[in-house]
Image: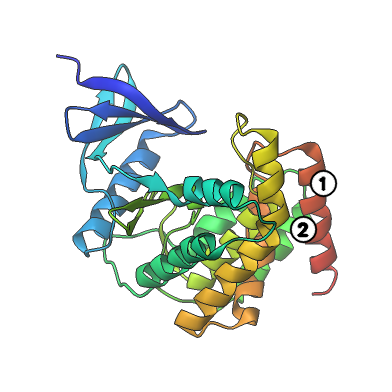
Amino acid sequence: MNKLGNRIGSGGCSEVFEWEHDKVIKLFRSNTTWDAVKGEFQNSVAAWQCGLPVPQPYRVVEVAGRPGIVFEKIVGTTIMELLLAKLLNSGQQTPNEEAVSDIRIIAGLLHNIHSRSVLGIRTNQIESIKATIARASRLTIEEIRCISDYLDHLPVRHALCHGDPNPYNVMIRNGKPIMLDWMGASKGDPAADIAEFILLCRYGVLPTDTPSHVADRLNTTRPMIENIFVEEYKTVSGMQDEEIEAWIVPLAVCKLTGDGMTDEQYTDITNYIRQKMSLW
C-alpha cells in the first residue's frame, strides 16, 4: 500500500509529504546523497534523544528510488510565516511587539541547542566549512587557502550547533518552538550559528512565489530583525560581538557555493568578503 500522501512542503533539496496518519516523509532530490540523508537522520536522532524540541525521527526509507526520512508530523506554523503575517498586518515599518517576540524565540531556542552536549553529532564544524568554501568558484585558489588558514586560528569549541537557523526551520506548535532540518548540525562554536543568522538576514532569498509587497515589507525590516536577534542572543548567552564577527567572512564564502541568489547578490557578497580580507 502506498503511504505517500499530499505534498505539504518543498525546498531546494527535498519535498515533504504526509505519511500515514501522524507522520511525514522528507523525500530528497537528486542533489542530495544517501550519505547526507543518513547523516541528517543520525543528527536528528541525537538531537531527539537528548531531549531537544525536534520532530521524532523514525527511519530512513526509499520511495521510487529516492531516499527519505520518516518523521513525526508537527502541526504548527513556521516563525517565518508568523513574522510575515505580523509585519503585513501591523501596517508598521518596524516589527511590532509580537514579531519581536518571535525573533527572540529563535535566539532562545538556539541558546538551548548550544547548551547541550550531544555525543551522536560527529561532524566537525570547521572541517565542514572548509569543505564548503573549497567549492567557492568566485574566489581565487589563494583566497580560499587564506580563509582556510584563517579558520585554523579560530577557537576550537565543541558545542552542538544547528548550521541552518533559518526562520523557516523553526515551527511553533502549541506556543512552543520546534527546530527542523538537522542536516548541517555539527560540533563547534555557537557564534557560527549567530553569524549564519546575520547573513540570512542580509542575503536570504525568499521563495519565488512570495508576493512583491510581502518581500518589500520584509526587506525594510531585515536590519531590525538582525539587531533584535543578535541583542537577544547576546543577552541570554553572554556572547560578545567580536566572537560573532570572527565567523562572518568564512560563512559568507559558504553563501557563494549556494544557489538562488541574483548575480548582483553574489557580486555584493564577493566584494564584501574581499573588503574584509583586505583588513586581515
Q: Give the quarter of the figure containing the C terminus.
A: bottom right
Instruction: Give, as a three-letter code, the residue at label 2.
Output: Glu
On the rendered structure, is 7 left or right of 30? left
Circle 1 SS class: helix
Foreground residue among 82 and 158: 82
Can residue 148 be seen in this snapshot?
no
* Circle 2 Cα neighbour tier, 10 Å, few/some/many (<14 / 14–19 / ≥20): some
* Above or below 98: residue 205: above
For marks 1 and 2, give the CA distance.
15 Å
Instruction: Give, as a three-letter code, the residue at label 1.
Output: Thr
In percent of the image, x 42 and y 70: which residue is there? 108
Asked if disc 1 and disc 2 are in contact, CB closer than 8 Å, the reply is no
Query: Residue at the left extreme?
Result: 1
Q: Can you give x and y, in whole percent of width and height, for residue 267 in the image?
A: 82, 46
Q: Can you give x and y, in whole percent of width and height, for residue 234 in the image?
A: 53, 80
In percent of the image, x 67 and y 42: which residue is there? 215
- Give the image quarter of residue 66: top left
Residue denoted by label 1 = 267
Foreground residue among 16 and 172: 172
* Circle 1 Cα neighbour tier, 10 Å, few/some/many (<14 / 14–19 / ≥20): few
Residue denoted by label 2 = 143
Q: Can you give x and y, in whole percent of width and height, for residue 76 in the image?
A: 33, 45
On the rendered structure, is 84 left or right of 213? left
In percent of the image, x 31 and y 42: which residue is there? 38
Number of the label disc, if any, that sits on residue 239: none
On the rendered structure, is 230 left or right of 121? right
Can residue 73 be seen in this snapshot?
yes
On the rendered structure, is 87 left or right of 17? right
In percent of the image, x 77 and y 50: which residue is there? 139
